[in-house]
Amino acid sequence: AIGFINGQWIPVEQAVLPIDERGHNFGDGVYEVIRVYQGVPFKMREHLERLLKSAEAILLKLPYTIEELEALIAEGLAKTELQEAAVYMQITRGIATRVHLFPDVPASTTMTIRPAADIPSNVREAGINVTLVEDERWKNCYIKSLNLLPNVIAKQKAKDQGFYEAVFVRDGIVLEGSSCNIFLVKDGVLITPPANRFILHGITRATLLDIASSLQIPVEEKEFGPDLLLSADEAFLTSTSMEVMPIIAVDNQPIGTGKPGEISLKLHAHYRDSYK
Ligand code: PDD
């Protein structure tokens, strides 16, 4: 594993805590998580374009071009020699005395590259039980911002109650998990909430939609409520780290056969093939 802070590669365990870092003080920054398979960052360009979009949305100018960020990731990867890795990249509004107004200082860029923490195969094979929770987040969830307090609290509460993930519901509409997107299959149609401001526009989500189209699986991006989810034939979560994770129950009520669905498994197999 290796760390990067403002132009320097360092051991990840090295203590670097600028007291006035705005990432800490205000959560004033954006981030990305990129999976590396067999030494190659998967969908790196898409992730970095989303980083740029997130930065623009919070009026933050990225200190590097996308090409420079790609080169930095390649440099770090070469140093770690990791084949299966997770890249975490964070850009904040920098280090400055704590006042709310934007400081005139350079943005901070930090990165870690660590061995990928793969999901245990028994969890994936069994499928997961998720719980629906009220979405208490703000209205700009398409921004991959550092402000994850509602997400981490929802995930922890879900875990404490024996669930694998919390799925946010806002005004009766199912949106996404605390760190993933959600799909369901109903009568052969793959359905996922639309990419509006209430969800993160997941790179895995977009990849899955492409794969489904190429397999001629009908796709609909539309809003749905808990009722459709509970009556679905299949459901699954997607994210960079989860890939495709079958949901077998929602609040302990079985979905479909109560086992990972056929289409879910097929989509995951194709997803895994797409980076080989
Ligand atoms: N989470 N929705 C939310 C709220 C997320 O935090 C994530 C990603 C996703 C899926 O996005 P993608 O497919 O681009 O990874 C959806 C990352 C992995 C994280 O915070 O660790």
Image: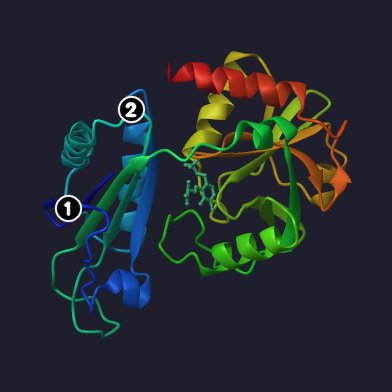
The mark found on residue 10 in the picture is 1
Label 2: state its secondary structure.
loop
Residue 133, horizontal then vertical, whole percent: 72, 62
Residue 120, horizontal then vertical, whole percent: 59, 36
Residue 66, horizontal then vertical, whole percent: 22, 40
The answer to whether residue 170 shows anywhere in this view is no
Q: Residues within 10 Å of mark 1 (few under 14, many from 20)?
A: some
* Residue in the image at 74% along x and 36% along y: 235
Q: Which residue is mark 2?
A: 83
Residue 187 appears left or right of 220: right
Taking depth in this image into account, of 2 and 207 the one nearest to the observer is 2
Residue type at mark 2?
A: Gln
Residue 198 appears left or right of 28: right
Residue 16 against residue 253 in the figure, above or below: below
Residue 257 appears left or right of 195: right
Residue 220 against residue 201 in the figure, above or below: above
Residue type at mark 1?
A: Ile
Residue 71 against residue 147 in the figure, above or below: above
* Quarter of the figure with residue 208: top right
* Residue in the image at 59% along x and 55% along y: 178
Alpha carbon distance from label 1 to label 2: 19 Å
Q: Quadrant of the N terminus?
A: top left
Residue 96 against residue 76 in the figure, above or below: below
Taking depth in this image into account, of 8 and 232 the one nearest to the observer is 8
Q: Residues within 10 Å of mark 2 (few under 14, many from 20)?
A: some
Q: Are marks 1 and 2 in contact (CB under 8 Å)?
A: no
Label 1: state its secondary structure.
strand
